[in-house]
Image: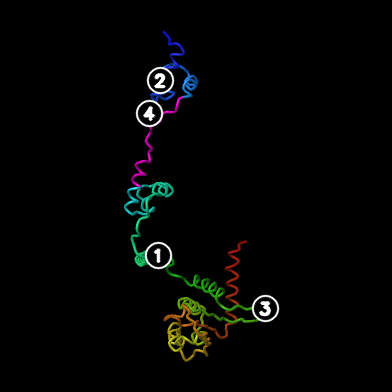
Amino acid sequence: MVQAKPEMKARARELRREGKTYDEIVAELGVSKSSVSLWVRDLPKPVSPPAWTQRTNPKDATRLKALELRSQGMTYDEIQAELNVSKTSISAWVQDLPQPEPRWTKIEKMQRLEMAHRAFRKDRDEERRRLTCEAASQVGEINNRELLLLGAALYWAEGSKDKAYARRESLTFINSDPRMIQVYVRWLELLGVDRHRMRCSLHIHDSADLGEATRFWSHLTGVPAHDFLKPSIRRDNPGTNRLNRGATYRGCLRIYVRNSARLYRQVEGWWHGISAWAVGP
């Protein structure tokens, strides 16, 4: 026999006082949730929900571990790496804990930073050397045609050019890179330019050793030192301490080829051919 409504109301109120949820009361009495809500609305809410309704936060264990690690003096980065959680979560969990004492003094921090930078520079230099060696091995032997085109492009990039307002139809090349000078001299040999047609001169600062620099470039080019022209010497301003004037600084070498107007016009033609190929039809 179905219970009378007043009895259901009384039972619902009793169950609510025991801490039952609306769903539990509905399941036991077989009435609607709106009826239960109406009958018990004047009753105070349970102090705490039933134990079975209290779900464990899946991050509780992680939060407790974060607190433990922070208490041990670990940084946010270290905790993040250990627990794989965001720094925002870590900050919220450990904000009430005092900041740990610094692990290292200021000097120790600087020393550790310098060690890290030194290791980084070492790895970077090794990578640079590896890539440079790999790229150099890809070049292999260079035939005469390749040297002809290479030298023409090199000259048009670094050599002096003839202008309509200033006719300079002669080969004049200046550079401070010994290897570039070596390539240029090899190119001149290919073009049939003898050493006696080369006129070398130095452009150098007065802080350098002019004699040593002259001997160096003479040995590199095969042009006798006594055939070098008068150098162009630039005086340094007082207090100048430029980093590009160390022990290997030997200034710039200028190589002028005598009677080279015809060669210059050929170089200009070779360059026009290269640039026309690049532009295409």
Q: Which residue is mark 4?
A: 50
Q: Secondary structure at mark 1?
A: helix
Q: Earlier in the sequence, mark 2 or mark 4?
A: 2
Q: Secondary structure at mark 2?
A: helix
Q: Earlier in the sequence, mark 1 or mark 2?
A: 2
Q: Earlier in the sequence, mark 3 or mark 1?
A: 1
Q: Nearer the viewer, residue 75 or 81?
A: 75
Q: Can you tell which mark lies on residue 14?
A: 2
Q: Can you tell which mark lies on residue 124?
A: 1
Q: Which residue is mark 3?
A: 164
Tag in front: 3 or 1: 1
Please check the rendered image and state whether residue 46 is part of the magenta-colored stretch, yes or no: yes
Amino acid type for the residue under numbered disc 1:
Arg
Q: Nearer the viewer, residue 238 or 31?
A: 31
The spot of residue 3 in percent (x, y) is 43, 11
Q: Earlier in the sequence, mark 3 or mark 2?
A: 2
